[in-house]
Image (tube, rainbow, N blue to C red):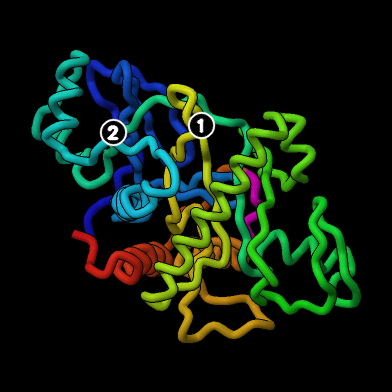
Amino acid sequence: MMPPVLETKLPGLSLFARGKVRDVYDLGETLLLVTTDRISAFDAVMPNGIPHKGRVLTQLSRHWFRFLRHVVATHYITCDEEYIADRIRERGGTADENTRNVLQGRSMLGVKAAAFPIECVVRGYLAGSLWKEYVEAGGTGHGVNLHGIELPGGLRESEQLPHPIFTPATKAESGHDENISFDSAADIIGEETVRQLQKLSLELYDTAARSALKHGIIIADTKFEFGRHRDTITLIDEALTPDSSRFWDATIYQPGRSQPSYDKQFVRDWLLASGWNKEPPAPSLPEDVVQHTSDSYREAYRRIVGRPLL
């Protein structure tokens, strides 16, 4: 298994931002997004990464950006490595063989868009933080209102909701994102903008979920990020990856329990069992956890796209 890419340094280029997973470089009118193999859990980045993870996220995002472009404008320009290398050189950067090996399969050129300061989450199934809130509000016994949304009582964990719901969240620089109501989101970015994002998010989810289900994958929930580029609402960052979505195998789906998923849940489960107190530094992941997670990410790609990761 190839060693993971944990950090990139591209000589001659300005680092625009470094997130938990992506290193973003400023190329003037565009941004170069390089998705590393870093993996985070419980708000901490693990000291060792997951081989192939960055390539899966980049190439799966490319798949969805292209598939969904009839629904919304996206920031995606290209993943073509020759084109990207030319743009790097134009900005005075180095695009030698070593640099290109690092970028291979994990780099994407995108337009610059002014990001909205909220996450747009769509949930088709009762799982994750929504299930926790539902139980705490007494939903197993009666109907509840969560963040301005009415949900019927008596639903089971992982059960399909009567219809997909839009649950925006704040973007946290550190700590957890916080689920908020439509009205709270409107206070942040304006009611008209939230309505547009709600409509787009639900349409994107519906379109993607129907496509994925044909390949035996349930998209239980997902989050989108949007920005404005030349006054146009634009889908940015990533789209429908194991980092931003909960993917379940439709052939073994059974409501009433937590579902096996194609994401980093295996990492979270190991960390919880390890006794780690969730305070830095995070422990190194054992080889079997790394291998299992890498295989899971690649299997998600294979199932959704219909071919193995190259």
| Residue 200, placed above or below residue 78 | below
Image quarter (top left, top right, bottom left or bottom right) of the N terminus:
bottom left
Q: Around disc 1, counting alpha carbons within 10 Å, would you say few (fewer than 14), some (14 to 19), or many (20 or more)? A: many
Residue, x 59% and y 42% (percent of image)? 197
Read off the residue under disc 2: 109
Amino acid type at image mark 2: Leu
Judged left or right of residue 62, residue 210 is right
Read off the residue under disc 1: 227
Give the mark, 2 or 1, whose residue is nearer the N terminus: 2
Q: What kind of element bears circle 1?
A: strand
Residue, x 51% and y 31% (percent of image)? 227
Numbered range of the magenta stretch: 275-279
Of 13 and 122, the residue lying toward us: 122
Image quarter (top left, top right, bottom left or bottom right) of the C terminus:
bottom left
Specify the label residue 79 is tagged with: none
Report the magenta stretch's main SS: loop
Residue 187 in the image, given as x and y percentages of width and height:
77, 30
Residue, x 85% and y 64% (percent of image)? 136
Residue 295 in the image, given as x and y percentages of width and height:
34, 68
Closer to the eye: label 2 or 1: 1
| Residue 94, placed above or below residue 61 | above
Residue, x 33% and y 71% (percent of image)? 303
